[in-house]
Amino acid sequence: MEIKVRVNGVDHKAEAQQIKGVLWVHYQGRTFTVDNSSGRKSRKGGGAGGSSDQIAAPMPGKVTKILLKVGDKVAAGQAVLVMEAMKMEYTLKSEIAGEIESISGAAGEQVALGKVLVKIKASAE
């Protein structure tokens, strides 16, 4: 479903879906969740929270493009793969700089919510 979110007095359109009591809101390549049972809010960047070394599916959908391969260097914020869900494309990005350690999905594959798609070995900086 499409929703309107007001941030600092400015309205923005975002895609949202409710799955098992959790509201998932997708906006500009980012995923935000609100747990309806606790009201707890969190941000899931590219499907993974915080400075995660993993990129997980933020919702059930289909992997449409894998932009990097195992061994490639990746920068924080760099696009790694593209998913399609709810008739929208979502670009999943790395939270950290490093090297692609493994890829667990393939283009055209249907994936479940939370499936780890990419693991990243952090740069030793």
Image: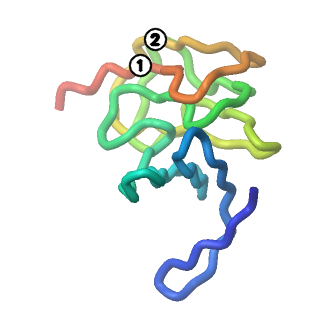
Identify the image's colour scheme: rainbow, by chain, secondary structure or one colour: rainbow
Q: Position of residue 120 (x, y in %)?
A: 38, 22
User: In screen coordinates, is 119 left or right of 83?
Assistant: left
Q: Position of residue 65 (x, y in %)?
A: 71, 26
Q: Give the residue at the far left of this rendering.
A: 125
User: In screen coordinates, is 34 left or right of 61?
Assistant: left
> Contact, CB < 8 Å: mark 2 with mark 1?
yes
> Residue at label 1?
119
Q: Please report the residue visible at 69 percent of the width from the left and 66 percent of the height from the top.
A: 3
**Amino acid of disc 1:** Lys
Q: Position of residue 99 (x, y in %)?
A: 38, 21
Is residue 49 placed above or below 12 in the rendered structure?
Answer: above
Quadrant, the N terminus:
bottom right
Is residue 28 placed above or below 125 in the rendered structure?
Answer: below
> Residue at label 2?
102
**Which one is nearer the viewer's eye here, 83 or 35?**
35
Q: State how far apart marks 2 and 1 are (Cα).
A: 5 Å
Is residue 112 placed above or below 18 in the rendered structure?
Answer: above
Q: Secondary structure at mark 2?
A: strand
Q: Secondary structure at mark 1?
A: strand
Q: Please report the residue visible at 55 percent of the width from the left and 16 percent of the height from the top.
A: 69
Badge 2 density bin: few <14, some 14–19, many ≥20, Cα 10 Å: some
User: In screen coordinates, is 51 left or right of 42?
Assistant: left
Q: Please report the residue visible at 41 percent of the width from the left and 19 percent of the height from the top.
A: 119
Asked where in the image residue 66 lies, by quadrant, the reply is top right
Quadrant, the C terminus:
top left
Q: Give the residue at the far front of this rendering.
A: 37
**Which sits earlier in the primary sequence, circle 2 or circle 1?**
2
Q: Which mark is residue 52?
A: none
Total marks in image: 2
Badge 1 density bin: few <14, some 14–19, many ≥20, Cα 10 Å: many
**Which one is nearer the viewer's eye here, 79 or 12?**
12
